[in-house]
Amino acid sequence: MSNIKIQQNYILSQSWYQTIELSNGLSTNGSVSVSSRMKRIGQVDFSGKTVLDIGCNSGGNSLWAKKFGAQKVVGIDLSKRRISQARKLAKFEKLTIDFKCINLFNYNPKSKFDVILCFAVVTEIQDLVGALSKIKYLMNDVAYVELNLAKPRLYLSTSKVWLRGFKGISRTKSVLEIYQHKVGLTLSPSIEVVKQIFGTNFKIENLGRGERYDLIKVTKHKE
């Protein structure tokens, strides 16, 4: 049996979330297109960069970064099944990518990453602030984060917690909305709260709608 037939049989035997186009013309049949998602973030120079793909799923974004010249790519995810799929596809494509089945909060690499990709992850976990703070700690240059943003038009409060917690942000923008998700109650921050979490050493840009949620670009100012 030819290699392409073996690969096709494997792809057909699996269920997929990501639609990943392989170099031999085969494609996984998922609900979210990797090529469409990656094109939304614009022209990213992966050449020679170190890349961290948080919530990598079956590795589509990691494969994309490596094919476009990334020097080192690490993909992390909680699902053993998805990591197994990612490793299989990387083998099919003859690409060296380090896929790890690990929680973001337990991942402590020795060095930071030039580019971080984190799509539809932080909205779907309960520790939003902790996740964004971890991304801040891990990034060396730029991060692309897809999350559900709160977009308040009017918000009034006399809360002293607000006065202490979000000093310098107006009441109409200092918002963390409660968001009902399958994992339970999660939080959706306004863009101003995201800026507060990252701090003044980072530039935050709202790139508009992503594949599922809002897409932001975080750039670390050069020292």
Image (cartoon, helix red, strand yellow):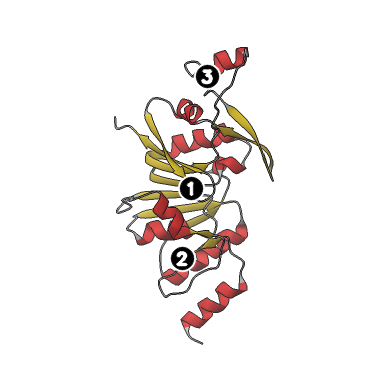
Side (left or right) of 158 relative to 25: right
Q: In what element is the residue under mark 2? A: helix
Instruction: Assign a secondary structure to mark 1.
Output: loop
Q: Which residue is mark 3?
A: 166
Amino acid under label 1? Gly
Residue at x 54%, y 18% (from the top left corner): 171
Q: Residue furthest bottom?
A: 1
Residue 154, position as x, y percentages in the image: 57, 23
Disc 1 to disc 3, how far (Cα)? 27 Å
Residue 148 position within the rendered picture, expressed as x and y whole percent measured from the top left: 55, 40
Horizontal and vertical percent position of residue 88: 51, 68
**Is 140 situated left or right of 162 in this image?**
left
* Residue at numbered disc 2: 90
Which callout, 1 or 3, points at the residue further toward the start of the chain?
3
Of the image marks 2 and 3, the number of the one nearer the N terminus: 2
Q: Which residue is mark 1?
A: 210
Residue 205 falls left or right of residue 178: left
Position of the C terminus, as image quadrant, is: top left
Instruction: Indicate the amino acid at tag 2.
Output: Ala
Q: Residue 179: which quarter of the image?
A: top right
